[in-house]
Image: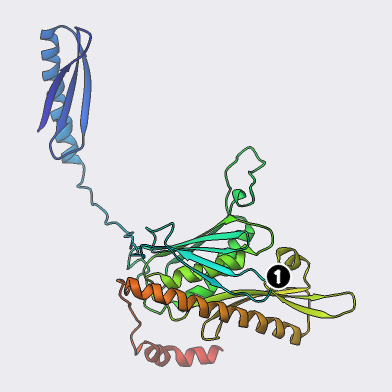
Amino acid sequence: LPHCHLEPCAPARCAVLHIFAEERSDRCCVALFGDGDNITTLMRYYRAVTLLLIAASDALQAPAARRPARTRRHSATLPDEPHRVEIAQGAGREPLVLETGRIGRQADAAITATRGGTTVYATLCVGAADAGGGDFLPMSVEYQERFSATGRTSGSYNKRDGRANDGEILTCRLIDRPLRPTVPDGYTADVQLLAWVLSYDGAHDPQVLAVQACAAALRMSSVPTLEAVGAARCVVREDADGQKTFVVDPPPADVASADFGIVVGAAADGSVLMVEAEGAFVPEADALAALEAARAEAVATATAIAEWADALRDERGASGVPLRPYPDDLETAVAETFGARVADQT
């Protein structure tokens, strides 16, 4: 039953009636005006009306079913001191600097990747273990290039960063494609990757740097992975004499003016996980040469990421999310049931 509490107010002819119920968060406040006898009469009246309303609502309203929380965050246990590593990128080129443990300590993994004056901050968080239902990996990737990264603000009336443009959406796909195959089958926990460009100097590509930062975060996180991933870009340029040069990790200006460009995501074991190319028609030999140059650079980066991340990952321990592998006889059962039909149609 609801309880009533009469609280006199500053005016002599005013009071506030507080009506509340135990084990409920409902509370009703009624302002009453009048003499002492009138206020007492009104209090009894409003108490009776409130009793009637609560009884009617409890009788007519079905008990609310409380939905269980779908997202349960798994926090990482990072070392007390920040860890930093420099990965050489070749003669005359800025090294790749990866750092963790300084910011984003409540995420499952947080990586700050820097090359020159370009910095990308990537975080990975793990949610509910059964979000995928046992048949796919619900991993989402977000990539954002902010105006503040170049020291500018939006020139429009709305000064906030807007929705993701086409380039940012394509970069999200560039990050997702090489990382998803490295997660073993049966892992269905909800995974979220966020990559933000904190600073941009105009000389180092933030897209490839975002792939490397997210790859390091995935390798260091509690998500099980088969191999570490690296990424690299290579362009083909032709000078006035017709001589072709292959440039690995070119500046954005060279990427825009190149005849052919390719981005390769590769694992530490040398396998190619993702290839994205654009440009004019080039001979097959040139395309293969650019592919091999980018693959070699990506493999070297992936190997360095694996050596650094695995050491920190061993300190944190194994993942608490169990795997749900497919049954061993699933492929055999599908082949026996649909194999002949598929063969006839193909």
Q: Residue at x 71, y 85 (%)?
A: 289
Compared to residue 226, the image places residue 72 above or below, namely above
Quadrant occupied by the N terminus: top left
In this picture, residue 24 sits left or right of residue 218: left
Pointer 1: what residue? Answer: 250
Image spot of residue 33 (x, y percent): 21, 11
Specify whether 138 is left or right of 66: right
Give x and y (percent) for residue 206.
61, 63
Of residues 222 and 174, the one nearer the viewer is: 222
Q: Residue 22 at x, y = what percent?
A: 12, 36
Whether 147 is drawn above or below 230: the answer is above
The quadrant where residue 250 appears: bottom right
Whether residue 273 is visible to the viewer of this picture, yes or no, is no
Query: Is disc 1 placed on a helix, strand or loop?
Result: loop
Q: Left or right: where does residue 52 sit relative to residue 126?
A: left
Q: Nearer the viewer, residue 271 or 11?
A: 271
Task: Name the residue at 38% across, 65% down.
Answer: 190
In this rendering, position of residue 335 left or right of residue 47:
right
Q: Where 45 falls versus 301 (above or below)?
A: above
Report x, y in % for residue 181.
48, 78
Q: Amino acid at mark 1?
A: Pro
Q: Residues within 10 Å of mark 1 (few under 14, many from 20)?
A: many
Which quadrant of the structure image shows residue 247?
bottom right
